[in-house]
Image (cartoon, helix red, strand yellow):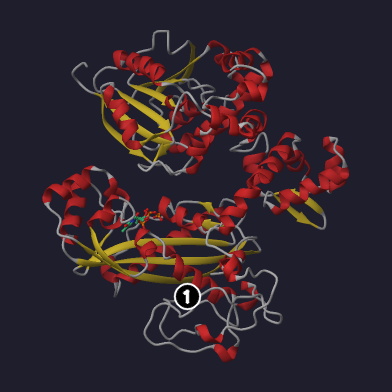
Amino acid sequence: MALKPVLGKLISKRVVLASASPRRQEILTNVGLRFEVVPSWFKETLEKSSFASPYEYAIETAKQKALEVANRMHVKHLRTPDIVIGADTIVTVDEQILEKPVDKQDAYRMLSRLSGKEHSVFTGVAIIHCSSKDNQLEMEVTDFYEETKVKFSDLSEELLWEYIHSGEPMDKAGGYGIQALGGMLVEYVHGDFLNVVGFPLNHFCKKLVELYYPPPKHSICHIKHDSVPPVDTFENLSDGENESSNFAEHKGANKLDNSRTHPSGPVYNSEDHYCVKTGFMVPLENTAKSLPTILELIDGFRASKALFVACKLKVFDHLKDKGSLNAVDVANEVGASLCGMERLLDACAALGLLEKTPQGYSNTDSANTYLTSDGKYSLHGYIIHSNEHLWPLFTNLEFAVKEGTRQNHRAFGKKTEDLFKDYYHSQEGKQRFMAAMHSIAHLTARDVATAFDLSQFKSACDLGGCTGALAHELVQIYPNLKITVFDLPEVIANTSYFQPSGQCTAPVTFISGDFFKDNLPEVDLYILSRVLHDWPDEKNHTLLSKIAAVCKPGSALLVAEIVLDEQKTHPPRALLQSLTMTEGKQRSGSEYKQLLEKYGFMNVQIKITENLLDALLCFRKSQSL
Ligand SMILES: Cc1cn([C@@H]2O[C@H](COP(=O)(O)OP(=O)(O)OP(=O)(O)O)[C@@H](O)[C@H]2O)c(=O)[nH]c1=O
């Protein structure tokens, strides 16, 4: 299938997936779609009895999820997205709609209803095209649904509970995940498997074909018995010499239907495809589903380096201050050659980081937010660290893989310990390292702080809390919390630069110490953010034993780390990070649980936040170890 023409239509657009579902993100990423994830805040509380059929409920929920995100992004003066995609998956059995279970008992009720029976999985999808006129948001909604039938084997009580205790059912409609352990419960699947997983990719692509490649009038036909238009392949698509394939220009000809995908709607007939043009087309035999991803991976390093250099030269900072500038001005501001700067600016525009107009170049909203050194969620520090520290390490990745050791000696001519000392001894190195840590901590702080309700805790200590970014967020959310940031003296001495302005910083105090050696304060809640993955087992043993010794029964430990899925293949960021780590390691949810339980921390709860860090909360059990 030549997928590129259809997905290629979205390449220059700002596509937003209004979903927190990691499965949806993965399905769309796997086919090379580039999008941002903005989970919807729409509560799934529509009155089910007011819908004539379950799929109408799923479509309406999907639509509301996407509308909420489109409106929120517009109102917050972020750049209005071009396309917002929302989806909702439900399971229906005996005319009942099953969504995500609220607790284990609920999961039990759902799974025992599904046992031995065939049920339907519906995913409703809404694609919203947005535009902004006079600051008014205009939206055109296209929606559709897909149904897949699934049959479960008879499930014994034992198997059912074992499955529930695996934790898998909790964030999934119907209380199962067909893509993982839940697959073992399934006798057959009739229809699109990915629809069950959470996103009907095939139907989605067909819908895009309908929207972006409307048929010439003579090819319109009506079909009778299918909710899916009969476009069997995407290969014979072209931009058409006289046929614009631009969505906006075609709205009239092939008006977006705001209703269900209806059997009698205008659709393609697969035999009537028109005008195959060269250009964007990739011959069928040379193309593969994964080609866009592979090409992106091949070029990924160029994009990263272009971003790093633009940040290092403070291009985004200059553009933020000056508004729109031409290449000559930017080159002069940063002391670069004109021809080099022109190419860099064009590359940044192509990557969607800058806007290019006849007047010059200007920052996109994302660049202002993330890439300037004083942006609201500035990643500048992390980008500079990536350029100066991680890039040289990755250049030596081949040696790291062959030798199984960190490559600091090759990358920097220094052993790891000496390099670390250097960091802390040179003011520049220290600030750079702290700025990198601060970037990530600040960006993730809200999601980590709200992953669990922490209002019961009165005192907390963030061990290795560095600049206090998480601590400051915590005290904003939990005004009764007093929190201590505990870190090495050389870190604490440099925290003042990172303190938030306009916020009362009194409930956050800083203590110097080495958490491997010094006494830890007695508090209700200990926090380890991005610590455990970094150290070898012996060091974690020392640290967790010390926390366990001082932590009173009922007190808790909050851990913020990337939590791998049980197959340890997701999220890719964590696995790529591991490539240059040799002492520590990334862990799955069950591995963290096991580690924490070993030190007497029970009731381990895990929250996958969809941000760069996930969160785990556990409580010190009452009897001593
Ligand atoms: C049947 C089944 C469902 N799911 C997941 O169930 C969630 C449904 O809930 P939702 O309300 O549609 O989505 P969400 O996860 O709450 O995300 P959001 O879009 O933000 O509402 C989605 O995750 C799906 O993948 C699986 O992963 N595997 C399966 O076999």
566 vs 206, nearest the viewer = 566
Within-10-Å neighbours for mark 1: few <14, some 14–19, many 20+: some
Residue 128 position (above or below residue 221): above
Residue at the bottom extreme, as displayed: 218
Residue 361 x/y as whole percent: 78, 50
Going by the numbered disc 1, the residue's amino acid type is: Asn
Q: Report the residue marked by disc 1.
A: 258
Q: Is residue 205 visible?
A: yes
Which residue is depicted at the point 56% across and 62% down?
A: 83
Examine the image and state in which quarter residue 403 appears. Answer: top right
Examine the image and state in which quarter residue 131 appears. Answer: bottom right
Residue 164 x/y as whole percent: 21, 46
Which residue is depicted at the point 38% across and 81% down?
A: 226
Residue at the front extreme, as displayed: 402
Which residue is depicted at the point 65% across and 20% down?
A: 429
Residue 258 x/y as whole percent: 47, 75
Residue 393 x/y as whole percent: 62, 29
Q: Quadrant of ligand 1?
A: bottom left
Would residue 356 appear left or right of 132 to someone viewing this image?
right
Would residue 295 appear left or right of 567 to someone viewing this image?
right
Which residue is depicted at the point 33% across and 32% down?
A: 591
Q: Quadrant of the C terminus?
A: top left
Residue 509 position (above or below residue 306): above
